[in-house]
């Protein structure tokens, strides 16, 4: 066939295939238009999961009567005027495709009253057929978009939709994500004339926490760290769920870049790497996080749905996210909430000898260090008067966060009393984290040593991977690899990290090169080493059924308060659980 110009209607339907996947896609595009129009209140009415009706009303600036025809034309927008505007987009929508695309696969009515105008006007599109002229209508300042019979003229698309319940679940999730991005906007969502969600506007700290609790649940907010970090014109803030409330699915992960909800592999990798040391296998962190940076540093014009972004300095963004989250998780020790006083910290009665800090390059020496640490706990001695003092109630200003040991339960749990109530400690999990963190510090202090291979291994690669290996030769050497490029598609592995001398060298090198290609960095070696150290710490820590003396238990509690990530074991399980006097009173119905 000869080349021919597509009709406007067909072009709109093709665009609709990219923008309008299901009812939730329509809702996303229309709400983003309302937000760009400066709306402070948005009402969303849905019928039959969005297939029968989607109506979105806002109190934004409205559309000028003379611009209504342009609003439903392709590639017409008020949000960009030049290429320079496209390089630093500040609005959520800017392509000018949403309304004409939606109108080509539905029956659309657009009613709007522009600010400073006395009259509202209505324009309609019926499956691509546009009304000849706008009609006068009654409407307050703002805009209402009504979408009926979605995909009525494209039955092949409609049959791919799921049940009404499923489609509404997708739609509600989109509304939740947008609701978390704009605390200053009130949102009401109705389904089949029944209120489903109603969030009041408010952008102070109390209102933000109320919105997060309404969308993510009080359990998330009660077990989340509120963070804020700034560096290099970037700001990361929001809420990060503690590892103890990690989920079986990645269904509570909300990340926004300049207010835009996104899915990005650089972000995902940085978050996963930050949580790598504190999550149980197969679990996913929960978070609501916002990254603010100059618009010129991020390209949002990557995909028609605008879910994906591209960072100008991806490595810098990755490192900032990782360091910020890693630091936040590392500081979740009890002392962060109630620091130990200097006098109590240095009192001899509570001092626990530190594990040896000398370099320990072999697994055998690591295991020896664990045994020495256990022996240190066993060598703690106190006089009868000291033990008696331990059992006396302490004042709130003096009591350390985890309190003082009272007893051991079934050789598994330590029961301690602090200023607010009772603390239950899993002694094996706690000692495992303490041992693991000390091993990591010792290993990182020594650096990664090389282990030359008796017989170098030849590895087939692509020319691209060969170029990567040459470009990152110094970095690979820091990781403990000695690699020579002996041909355009061949590498020779001469040495590997000593700690990983029994691992599959080829697979490890291939994985590192893959990481370098995608993110410019790799943590594979460190992760493998940490796995080995974690295994040693697990097997070397105090076991269940071991009887500990009161001084040993108190030594363990004080070490927990000093240890980074002391709230979780290496597998992400909590090491201690507090029970306040109020909670204990409720158990026994006291005060009722």
Image (cartoon, grey):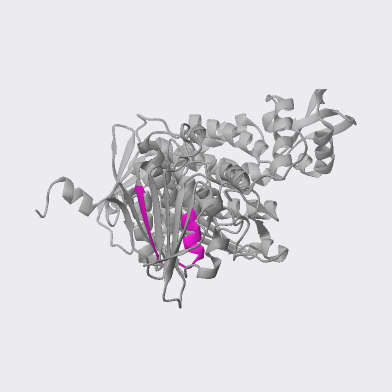
Residue 339 in the image, given as x and y percentages of width and height: 41, 60
For residue 330, say whether it is visible. Answer: no
Q: Tally the marks.
A: 0
Figure check: 135 above or below 484 = below
Quadrant including the N terminus: top right
* Residue extending furthest toward the front: 132
Give the residues drawn in magenta, as a range. Answer: 30-46
Figure check: 424 above or below 293 = above
Figure check: 139 above or below 23 = below
Please check the rendered image and state whether residue 346 is part of the magenta-colored stretch, yes or no.
no
Q: Nearer the viewer, residue 71 or 375?
A: 71
Q: Nearer the viewer, residue 241 or 198?
A: 198
Residue 590 in the image, given as x and y percentages of width and height: 12, 51
* Residue at 34% over, 63% down: 200
Figure check: 292 above or below 103 = below
* Residue extending furthest toward the left: 592
For residue 98, say whether it is visible. Answer: yes
């Amino acid at each position: 066939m000869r080349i021919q110009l597509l009709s406007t209607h067909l072009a709109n339907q093709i665009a609709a295939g990219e923008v309008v996947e299901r009812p939730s896609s329509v809702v996303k595009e229309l709400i983003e238009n309302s937000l760009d129009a400066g709306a402070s209140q948005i009402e969303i009415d849905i019928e039959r999961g969005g297939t029968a009706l989607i109506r979105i009303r806002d109190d934004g600036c409205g559309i000028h009567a003379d611009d209504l025809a342009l609003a439903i034309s392709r590639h017409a927008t008020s949000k960009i005027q030049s290429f320079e505007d496209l390089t630093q987009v500040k609005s959520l929508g800017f392509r000018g495709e949403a309304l004409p695309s939606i109108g080509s696969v539905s029956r659309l009515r657009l009613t709007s009253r522009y600010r400073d105008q006395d009259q509202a006007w209505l324009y309609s599109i019926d499956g691509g057929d546009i009304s000849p002229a706008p009609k006068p209508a009654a409407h307050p300042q703002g805009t209402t978009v009504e979408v009926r019979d979605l995909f009525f003229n494209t039955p092949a698309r409609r049959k791919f939709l799921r049940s009404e319940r499923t489609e509404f679940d997708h739609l509600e999730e989109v509304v939740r994500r947008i609701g978390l991005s704009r605390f200053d906007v009130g949102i009401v969502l109705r389904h089949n004339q029944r209120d489903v969600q109603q969030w009041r506007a408010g952008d102070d700290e109390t209102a933000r926490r109320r919105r997060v609790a309404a969308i993510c649940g009080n359990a998330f907010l009660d077990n989340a760290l509120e963070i804020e970090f700034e560096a290099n014109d970037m700001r990361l803030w929001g809420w990060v769920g503690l590892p103890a409330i990690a989920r079986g699915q990645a269904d509570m992960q909300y990340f926004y870049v300049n207010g835009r909800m996104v899915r990005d592999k650089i972000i995902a990798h940085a978050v996963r790497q930050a949580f790598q040391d504190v999550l149980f296998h197969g679990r996913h962190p929960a978070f609501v996080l916002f990254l603010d940076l100059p618009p010129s540093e991020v390209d949002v014009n990557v995909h028609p749905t605008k879910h994906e972004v591209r960072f100008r300095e991806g490595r810098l963004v990755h490192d900032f996210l990782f360091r910020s989250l890693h630091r936040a998780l590392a500081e979740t020790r009890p002392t962060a909430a109630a620091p130990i006083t200097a006098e109590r910290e240095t009192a001899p009665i509570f001092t626990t000898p530190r594990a040896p800090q000398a370099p320990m390059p072999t697994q055998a020496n690591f295991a020896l260090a664990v045994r020495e640490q256990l022996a240190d706990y066993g060598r703690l001695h106190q006089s009868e008067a000291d033990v008696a003092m331990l059992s006396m109630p302490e004042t709130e200003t003096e009591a350390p966060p985890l309190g003082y040991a009272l007893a051991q339960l079934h050789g598994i749990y330590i029961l301690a009393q602090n200023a607010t109530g009772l603390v239950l400690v899993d002694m094996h999990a706690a000692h495992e984290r303490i041992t693991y963190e000390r091993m990591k510090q010792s290993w990182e202090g020594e650096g990664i040593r090389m282990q030359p291979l008796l017989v170098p291994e030849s590895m087939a690669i692509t020319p691209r991977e060969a170029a990567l290996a040459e470009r990152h030769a110094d970095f690979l050497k820091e990781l403990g690899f000695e690699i020579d490029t002996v041909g355009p598609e061949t590498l020779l592995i001469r040495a590997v990290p000593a700690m990983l001398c029994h691992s599959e060298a080829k697979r490890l090198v291939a994985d590192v090169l893959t990481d370098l290609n995608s993110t410019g960095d790799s943590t594979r070696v460190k992760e493998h080493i940490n796995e080995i150290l974690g295994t040693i710490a697990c097997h070397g820590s105090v076991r269940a059924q071991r009887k500990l003396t009161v001084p040993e238990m108190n030594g363990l509690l004080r070490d927990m308060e000093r240890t980074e990530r002391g709230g979780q074991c290496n597998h992400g399980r909590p090491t201690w659980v507090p029970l306040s006097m109020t909670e204990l009173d409720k158990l026994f119905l006291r005060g009722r």
